């Protein structure tokens, strides 16, 4: 059932989607010794979320040129398309692509878009980009990232967000960057409620006023907040397999996505950093179907919620909507 269902993914870090074999290949080409990053069976090795961030950044250090990012984009989109994803939004960070220099960032973006255009023709998957600043790099670097975002905002770079270590700083420290991105016409999402508790979600809503929250699952510790999310129509980019791999919840059945869906919160399903967390969109669907007895109708409803919350233009949304119709898929 899940293989053939058309899927919409809103929360995918491009570097975090890099297959470990791809990163090992790049390291070999560039004579970099990254053997400590991998387990014996070839996966990424990390102990907890903070170690994950270090391994993520070390793996990303192999991606040194626009061409590397073009190859990465191709590999990632082939895998997404094989999982039935028809539309994807990916987080991109000028922090990693050209060191926050606008000219260099444009070159990286050009290579990524070229690969995405080819994947659209070859694999039938549509990609759009959301620029993220990295919270633990601090607000000053985030301003440069926001300027890169503002310079390249348009029909392909459609959003701005924040990722990284939620325990560092406060959402309001990044207000300048979010205002800059918003003025450039970018739509807003922000990671919150993954490692921070319900207050991190409340602070993020109050200070950054995002349309979407990345994760948001720890809102479950405060049911009044869950109801507020439902009432505001805030969309949660939920990544259950990521949460399970990082040990946020004891079992799939105890993952809050089930309760949140039942209470009317607009939940969506994504993979975050799939090879790190040994997941794929198909695996997310299979585990959720098993845990909550969700049928095809629920997954179709969630795919539609995801498409409605996508940051693309209306012509693109209408084109993808056709692919979600049961008679076309
Ligand atoms: N960067 C990549 N994956 C992330 C996650 N799950 N949370 C915060 N920052 C990230
Ligand atoms: Zn994320």
Image: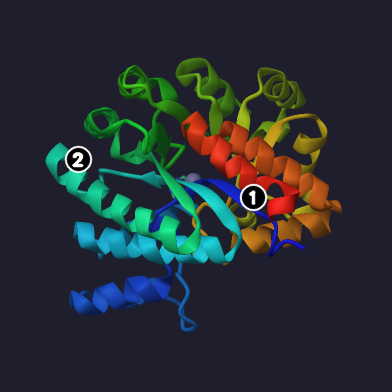
| Res 256 visible | no
Q: Residue at x 70, y 46 (%)?
A: 325
User: Which image quarter: residue 216?
Assistant: top right
Image x and y of residue 154, in percent: 33, 31
Judging depth in this view, the residue of 13 and 74 nearest the camera is 74
**Label 1 to label 2, Cα distance in Å?**
32 Å
Vertical placement of residue 15 versus 300, above or below? below
**Of 206 and 117, which appears nearest the observer?**
117
Q: Is disc 2 placed on a helix, strand or loop?
A: loop
Q: How crowded is mark 1: few (under 14 residues within 10 Å), some or many (20 or more)?
A: some
Residue count near mark 2 (Cα–Cα under 10 Å), binned few <14, some 14–19, many ≥20: many
- Residue 22 visible to the viewer: yes
Secondary structure, mark 1, is loop
Image coordinates of residue 108 in percent, x first then y, are: 22, 50
The residue positioned 34% from the left and 63% from the top of the image is 72
* Quarter of the view holding residue 116: bottom left
Query: Is 87 left or right of 284, judged from the image as shown?
Result: left
Residue linked to disc 1? 248
Q: Is 174 left or right of 258, judged from the image as shown?
A: left
Residue farthest to the bottom, as pictured: 40
Q: Where is residue 112 in the image (x, y as percent from the top left)?
A: 30, 53
The residue shown at (49%, 38%) is: 316
Residue holding disc 2: 100
Vertical order, 118 against 258 (above or below): below
Asked if residue 52 is positioned above or below residue 235 in the image, the reply reads below
Q: Where is residue 123 in the image (x, y as percent from the top left)?
A: 48, 62
Q: Quadrant of the N terminus?
A: bottom right
Tag count: 2
Rendered position, 107 above or below 147: below
Q: Assign the C terminus to one quadrant of the image.
A: bottom right
């Amino acid at each position: 059932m899940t293989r053939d269902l058309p899927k919409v993914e809103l929360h995918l870090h491009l570097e975090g989607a890099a297959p470990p074999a791809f990163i090992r290949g790049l390291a070999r080409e560039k004579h970099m010794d990254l053997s400590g990053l991998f387990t014996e069976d070839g996966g990424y090795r990390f102990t907890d979320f903070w170690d994950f961030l270090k391994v993520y950044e070390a793996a990303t250090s192999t991606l040194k040129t626009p061409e590397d990012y073009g190859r990465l984009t191709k590999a990632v989109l082939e895998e997404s398309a094989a999982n039935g994803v028809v539309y994807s939004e990916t987080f991109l960070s000028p922090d990693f692509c050209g060191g926050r220099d606008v000219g260099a960032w444009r070159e990286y973006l050009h290579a990524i878009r070229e690969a995405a255009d080819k994947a659209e023709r070859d694999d039938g998957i549509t990609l759009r980009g959301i620029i993220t600043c990295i919270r633990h790099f601090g607000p000053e670097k985030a301003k440069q990232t926001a300027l890169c975002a503002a310079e390249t905002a348009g029909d392909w770079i459609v959003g701005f967000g924040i990722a990284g270590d939620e325990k560092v700083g406060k959402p309001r420290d990044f207000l300048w960057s979010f205002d800059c991105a918003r003025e450039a016409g970018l739509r807003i999402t922000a990671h919150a409620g993954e490692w921070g508790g319900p207050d991190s979600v409340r602070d993020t809503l109050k200070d950054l006023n995002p349309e979407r929250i990345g994760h948001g699952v720890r809102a479950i510790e405060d049911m009044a907040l869950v109801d507020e999310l439902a009432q505001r129509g805030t969309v949660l980019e939920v990544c259950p397999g990521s949460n399970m791999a990082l040990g946020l919840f004891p079992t799939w059945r105890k993952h809050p996505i089930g309760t949140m869906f039942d209470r009317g919160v607009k939940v969506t399903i994504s993979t975050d950093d799939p090879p790190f967390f040994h997941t794929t969109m198909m695996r997310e669907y299979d585990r959720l179907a098993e845990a909550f007895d969700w049928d095809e109708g629920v997954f179709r409803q969630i795919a539609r919620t995801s498409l409605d919350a996508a940051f693309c233009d209306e012509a693109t949304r209408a084109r993808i909507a056709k692919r979600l119709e049961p008679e076309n898929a």
